[in-house]
Image (spheres, rainbow, N blue to C red):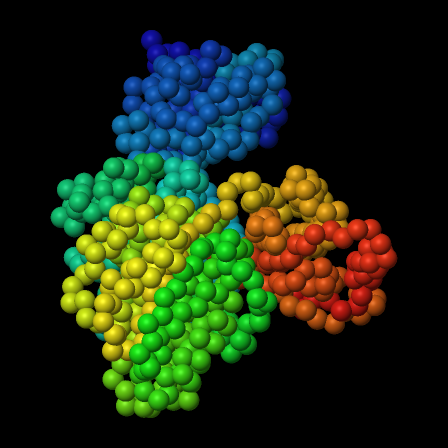
């Protein structure tokens, strides 16, 4: 029954090319039968024939051999039923196209359809379908035919070329390791992988990197980039910025040891190297990851880290073509990461040599309350400094230098170097790293480590940074005792700060400790001489001391010093108590703006409203609005991403403006010509504020400016002179550096 119906349909259909056609004089006899036979038996293009009800009546041999689109048992089914048999993207689009062809007679060329066989969903095929109507010479509609071509390979090649071009333009827009890794992840996911991670050797962030032929590379890596189709808020394991070590006998370690990329086409949950007790492996198992690729990141004979690609949502496993493509993308990212590494190394060296800005004498009362007790013995170079930093932050620096005759000079050198490094906005671990480098030089701070004097006691240093806005305390130690934390309730515990080598001794490796401290937490900072005769941990003694309320912080400091060092210390000893304070929401305000020209006006308007709520004088409001307008405008001009503005009311004496963007260009004052349209932003900022500076942000930088607040005097001639000064500032020709700032 079916065969006869198909026969009658095909006879009527192909009569147009046979003897009944008006142009039959130019067609050899039997040509119609030959064409019909070739289309259904020899054509490499798949052919489907449907009647007027869109019922499949016949397919050719090529269509039956299309293994990703099997048609067994589908002849005689309607087009909607056939579409339901496969996992097809937007089947309604196909049905609407078929209806248009039947009704209008206009062919539908090259309709790309993504097809998955429900029996093997891991395989996706892209089919290009062209549909045209079948009708007799008198216009009677008989049905439609669809020619299907597998274009999966072509579409995949085109997608790879587009992704390579995108990677060439989007990866490496800044000379920052973390931003470059993030850009790589944004390009790769979800285009190639559901999840992608970038781990770099920790020493890469310090400007170093192991050679490709090194037999013993340091295995500590730091997560520099992560992206997942699960969402932008999803965090990896470890999180970006965290340090990790790849376990032995895992593919990660094997790839870094051999520098050969690895494809795990089918990742079995019971793979022997997967350990559910490890957080990274547990995340892989919980996500249902079924395929992965690992590619070492290399550039200029240097090994930088490892890029990992995972699929858990896309059912298609990675193949060797995906691996080759991932290597191409990773090779470009490796060059950009190495550029960032080299830039960071040279920039850090330049900052150390430049010495930084000399800050004014600013109080640290907004961040901490301090109490100090000094027990002099006439020997040693124990010292402590509280250095005010931008954004109301404070650096608490404690140290011991040599105990010989050169102690005073060594102490002065170390303190001067620490102050300069801290004012550059460097984190504690990098400050100690730079100090160690200086102490290791023959003519630098070498005698601070005792190498020139023959003294046995090396130089130690403890560096803590505290931010009263975020309540975050970051710390690193160069052989110095870790401080104790006294919580507001009286509980005492040591702050977990790993002690690296003393300055100038051994290999520099300083771990950074981060801890959010509740308001009112007391940091107990001391040197080793204070506990020289204690013989054991003073935790129990401190618990008892702080269980009893003290009349003041200084009284508590004196009591603790007497209890911890009842006799005369052998060397100069000191004890410092620093009780933390916080700046709550009533004293800080932050906004994030898009990178758009109108953001400067919006930032100026919001800042003026906030300053009015803080009841500041109109002069302060006008000056601050001008500074904010200049800084935000420059960020819009030279940055790429969003811009953050933060205002900090540091007590009644200071107002801090901070503008953060993702640009690594460091602004500086320069000489602008009278005809220049730009280049005066920092000159205006310097004239209207008491101090300003630049510090590295997590990604990019923060440009800050601080104005000392004073009571507004009665109106008089001075107000007119101040107004004239502000007007003159905007017209001066001295401006900013080559970056245009």
Give the farthest residue toward the front: 551
Position in image of residue 145 (x %, y %): 48, 23
Q: Residue at x 23, y 51 (%)?
A: 543
Q: Residue at x 36, y 70 (%)?
A: 374
Q: Residue at x 44, y 80 (%)?
A: 412
Q: Nearer the viewer, residue 132 or 186?
A: 186
Examine the rendered structure and indicate whether residue 499 appears above or below residue 598. below
Q: In the image, is 243 to the left or to the right of 359?
A: left
Quadrant location, the N terminus: top left
Position in image of residue 735 (x %, y %): 73, 67
Quadrant location, the C terminus: bottom right
Position in image of residue 35 (x %, y %): 46, 29
Q: Residue at x 50, y 46 (%)?
A: 583
- The total of numbered circles placed on residues is 0
| Residue 310 in sight here | no
Q: Nearer the viewer, residue 714 or 649?
A: 714
Position in image of residue 39 (x %, y %): 43, 30
Q: Nearer the viewer, residue 385 or 107?
A: 385
Examine the rendered structure and indicate whether residue 105 appears above or below residue 326. above
Q: In the image, is 24 to the left or to the right of 740?
A: left
Examine the rendered structure and indicate whether residue 150 appears above or below residue 433. above
Give the farthest residue toward the top: 1
| Residue 594 in sight here | yes
């Amino acid at each position: 029954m079916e065969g006869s119906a198909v026969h009658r349909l095909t006879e009527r259909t192909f009569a147009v090319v046979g003897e009944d056609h008006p142009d039959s004089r130019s067609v050899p006899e039997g040509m119609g039968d030959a064409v019909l036979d070739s289309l259904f038996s020899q054509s490499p293009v798949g052919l489907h024939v449907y009647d007027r009800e869109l019922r499949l009546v016949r397919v050719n041999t090529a269509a039956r051999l299309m293994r990703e689109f099997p048609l067994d048992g589908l002849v005689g089914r309607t087009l909607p039923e056939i579409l339901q048999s496969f996992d097809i993207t937007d089947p309604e689009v196909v049905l609407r196209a078929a209806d248009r062809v039947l009704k209008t007679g206009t062919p539908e060329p090259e309709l790309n359809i993504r097809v998955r066989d429900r029996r093997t969903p891991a395989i996706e095929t892209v089919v290009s379908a062209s549909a045209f109507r079948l009708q007799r010479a008198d216009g009677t509609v008989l049905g439609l035919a669809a020619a299907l071509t597998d274009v999966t390979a072509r579409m995949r090649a085109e997608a790879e070329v587009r992704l390579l071009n995108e990677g060439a333009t989007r990866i490496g827009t800044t000379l920052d390791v973390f931003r470059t890794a993030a850009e790589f992840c944004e390009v790769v996911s979800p285009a190639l992988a559901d999840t992608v991670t970038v781990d770099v050797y920790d020493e890469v962030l310090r400007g170093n990197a192991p050679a490709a032929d090194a037999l013993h590379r340091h295995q500590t890596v730091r997560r520099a980039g992560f992206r997942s189709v699960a969402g932008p808020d999803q965090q990896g394991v470890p999180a970006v910025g965290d340090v990790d070590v790849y376990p032995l006998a895992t593919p990660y370690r094997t790839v870094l040891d051999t520098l050969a990329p690895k494809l795990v086409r089918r990742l079995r949950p019971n793979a022997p190297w997967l350990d559910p007790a490890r957080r990274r492996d547990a995340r892989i198992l919980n996500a249902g990851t079924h395929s992965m690729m690992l590619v070492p990141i290399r550039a200029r004979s240097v090994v930088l880290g490892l890029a990992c690609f995972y699929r858990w949502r896309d059912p298609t496993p990675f193949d060797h073509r995906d691996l080759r493509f991932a290597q191409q993308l990773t090779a470009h990212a490796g060059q950009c990461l190495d550029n960032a590494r080299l830039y960071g190394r040279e920039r850090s060296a330049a900052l150390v040599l430049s010495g930084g800005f000399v800050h004014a004498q600013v109080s640290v009362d907004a961040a901490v309350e301090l109490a100090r007790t000094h027990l002099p013995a006439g020997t040693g170079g124990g010292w402590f400094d509280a250095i005010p930093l931008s954004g109301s932050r404070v650096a608490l620096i404690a140290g011991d230098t040599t105990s010989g005759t050169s102690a005073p000079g060594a102490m002065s050198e170390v303190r001067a170097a620490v102050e300069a490094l801290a004012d550059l906005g460097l984190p504690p671990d990098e400050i100690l790293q730079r100090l160690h480098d200086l102490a290791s030089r023959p003519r630098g701070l070498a005698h601070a480590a005792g190498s020139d004097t023959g003294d046995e006691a090396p130089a130690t240093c403890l560096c803590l940074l505290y931010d009263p806005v975020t309540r975050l305390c970051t710390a690193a130690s160069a052989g110095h005792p870790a401080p104790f934390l006294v919580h507001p309730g009286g509980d005492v515990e040591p702050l977990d700060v790993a002690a690296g080598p003393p300055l100038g001794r051994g290999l520099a490796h300083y771990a950074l400790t981060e801890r959010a401290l509740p308001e009112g937490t007391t940091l107990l900072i001391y040197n080793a001489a204070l506990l020289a005769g204690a013989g054991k941990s003073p935790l129990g003694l401190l618990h008892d001391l702080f269980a009893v309320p003290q009349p003041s912080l200084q009284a508590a400091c004196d009591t603790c010093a007497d209890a911890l060092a009842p006799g005369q210390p052998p060397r100069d000893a000191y004890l410092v108590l620093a009780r933390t304070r916080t700046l709550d929401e009533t004293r800080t305000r932050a906004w994030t703006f898009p990178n758009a020209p109108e953001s400067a006006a919006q930032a100026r308007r919001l800042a003026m409203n906030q300053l009015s709520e803080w009841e500041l004088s109109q002069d302060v409001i006008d000056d601050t609005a001008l500074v904010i307008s200049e800084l935000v405008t420059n960020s819009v001009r030279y940055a790429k991403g969003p811009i953050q503005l933060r205002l900090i009311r540091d007590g009644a004496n200071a107002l801090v403006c901070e503008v953060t963007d993702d640009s690594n260009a460091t602004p500086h004052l320069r000489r602008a010509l009278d005809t220049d349209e730009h280049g005066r932003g920092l000159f205006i900022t310097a004239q209207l504020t008491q101090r300003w500076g630049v510090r590295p942000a997590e990604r990019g930088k923060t440009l800050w400016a601080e104005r000392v607040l004073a009571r507004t005097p009665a109106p008089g001639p001075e107000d007119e002179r101040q107004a004239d000064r502000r007007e003159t500032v905007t017209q001066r020709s001295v401006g900013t550096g080559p970056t245009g700032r």
